Image (tube, helix red, strand yellow):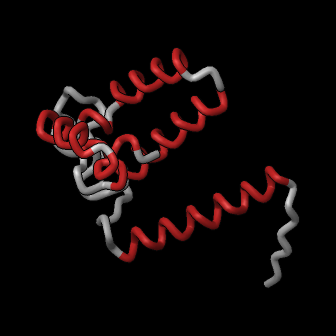
Amino acid sequence: ALIPDLCHTKSKIGRKFPLLSALISSVFGHRTFTHSLLFLLIIYFLATTYIPNDSLSIGLLVGMASHLILDAGTVNGIKFLFPASIKVRLPFYVKTGSTGEQVVLAALTVVTCYYIAVICGISIPIQF
């Protein structure tokens, strides 16, 4: 899920690959090429060609797609149809770093933990 943030030199993945991150950032800018359908399709092609494990490829693509959806839920949105300059933003959005973002993150964490527990067959007693 972190791969799209290669375009941001201060991101976790950008700090791991500083030269690549600086190059992508200077050529394309932030939330453009690496946050696009084109980039997702390139990664899909590379993953299905060079990663023998289908589950790993699917996990990689789902993580990246979820990243794009969540970034489309920010004030600035993403350029999903890059190289077209059209910005895509969800009708409901939050400011990055705001309390709203923390609420969304907490809710998604709870939902994810619940579904992992269901998949693993773990019983979670819920009392009201």
Measured from the top left, where is residue 116 in percent x and y?
73, 55
**Residue found at x 47% / y 72%:** 103
Q: Eyeballing the image, is 70 above or below 62?
A: below
45 relative position to 71: left or right: right
Q: Is residue 31 visible?
A: no
- Nearest the camera: 42 or 79? 42
Q: Is residue 110 left or right of residue 97?
A: right
Residue at the farthest top position: 49
Q: Is residue 118 above or below residue 61?
A: below
The residue under the point 42% across, 52% down is 70
Query: Depth check: 6 or 39 in front?
Result: 6
Q: At x 24% / y 49%, what residue is drawn? A: 8
Is 49 rendered above or below residue 9?
Answer: above
Residue 98 at x, y = what percent?
33, 73
Q: Is residue 93 visible?
A: yes
Along the line of sight, the residue nearer the viewer: 86 or 29: 29
Q: Could you tell whether 36 is left or right of 124 in the image? A: left
* Residue drawn at x 64%, y 58% as measured from the top left: 112
Q: Quadrant of the C terminus?
A: bottom right
Residue 68 position in % (x across, y down): 40, 43
Q: Nearer the viewer, residue 26 or 68?
A: 26
> In the rendered view, does 107 fall on the left or right side of 82?
right
Badge count: 0
Q: Which of the 4 image quarters holds residue 31?
A: top left
| Residue 56, picture quadrant | top right
- Name the outermost residue toward the left: 26
